[in-house]
Amino acid sequence: MGASSEHWDRIYRERGPEGVSWHQADPARSVGLITAAAPDHDAAIVDVGGGSSRLVDRLLDLGYTNLTVVDLASLALEYARRRLGDAADRVTWVETDVTAYRLVHPVRVWHDRAVFHFLVDPDDRSRYLARAQEAVAPDGHLIVATFALDGPSMCSGLPIVRYDATSMTRAVAPWFEPVRFEEETHVTPGGAEQRFLYGDFVRTA
Ligand SMILES: C[S@@+](CC[C@H](N)C(=O)[O-])C[C@H]1O[C@@H](n2cnc3c(N)ncnc32)[C@H](O)[C@@H]1O
């Protein structure tokens, strides 16, 4: 496994939910990809390594009813729950390592922004993909955002793996096949630009 929950909790404590480098006021690209993959608002959606992301707020606003957020960092989940208030009760929150967690029901969308790229050990990637292919329903989607080849080589003091469309496709084969790719330049709260690649994959038969 990569970094500990203590590592992530410390970063969230030191920087706060809106000071972490990956913070987005509006995760619009993820929302666009998820709504295209799962137009049905009853569809089960999991945001793995969701942290304190506002993605879950946007999906609740759109009427999605079956949302799960998984993260190692208890503090990140606590920030998100506090922000949402009573609406947090409409979300399933799971504090665990996604490479070890078996979802209890199949999902239409497995979304991951900036988690898979921390898995630098091939065994960790295999475990992650085993969990994803167990969890994603037939015809369901895996939506993964990582740093692109021209993105940073480290994040939060940890090494990461950068991907292009070819290497990302290879990394999730044979369980998933590509539907589309989108690139994005994320501007951190400190003003730095980070190039991301979003891959939308469908579960193979
Ligand atoms: C770079 S942040 C991205 C957070 C969120 N996806 C977003 O876009 O705002 C990475 C997140 O993944 C979590 N994380 C890292 N490794 C994890 C693992 N093995 N299992 C679950 N969560 C993990 C961290 O606690 C952190 O919240």
Image (cartoon, rainbow, N blue to C red):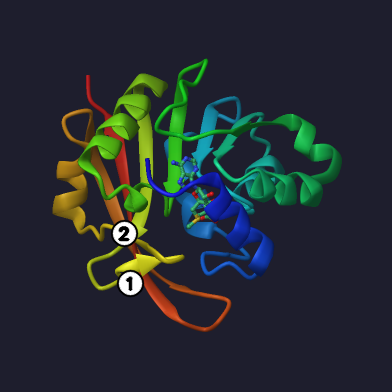
The quarter of the picture where the C terminus appears is: top left
Disc 2 vs disc 1: Cβ atoms closer than 8 Å? yes
Q: Cα distance, mark 2 to mark 1?
A: 8 Å
Q: Residue at x 50, y 44 (%)?
A: 49
Mark 2 close to ligand 1, CB under 8 Å: no
- Nearest the viewer among 50 and 140 is 50
Whole-percent x and y of residue 165? 19, 54
Whole-percent x and y of residue 112? 43, 45
Horizontally, is 84 left or right of 144 in the view?
right
| Residue 47 visible, this angle | yes
Whole-percent x and y of residue 16? 69, 65
Name the mark on residue 164: none
- Nearest the viewer among 45 and 93 is 93
The residue under label 1 is: 152
Question: Up-down: is 68 above or below 189?
Answer: above
Mark 1 close to ligand 1, CB under 8 Å: no
Q: Amino acid at mark 2?
A: Ile
Question: Up-down: is 148 above or below 107?
Answer: below
Horizontally, is 179 left or right of 118 in the view?
left
For label 2, the crowd category at 10 Å Cα-Cα, with few meaning under 14, some 14 to 19 and many 20 or more, is many
Q: Amino acid at mark 1?
A: Pro
Q: Which image quarter: residue 98?
A: top left
Q: Residue at x 33, y 53 (%)?
A: 117
The quarter of the picture where the N terminus appears is: top left
The residue under label 2 is: 160
Whole-percent x and y of residue 21? 53, 69
Q: Residue at x 59, y 37 (%)?
A: 69
- Number of marks present in the image shown: 2
- Nearest the viewer among 14 and 30 is 14
| Residue 18 visible, this angle | no
Which type of secondary structure does the marked residue at label 2 adopt?
A: loop
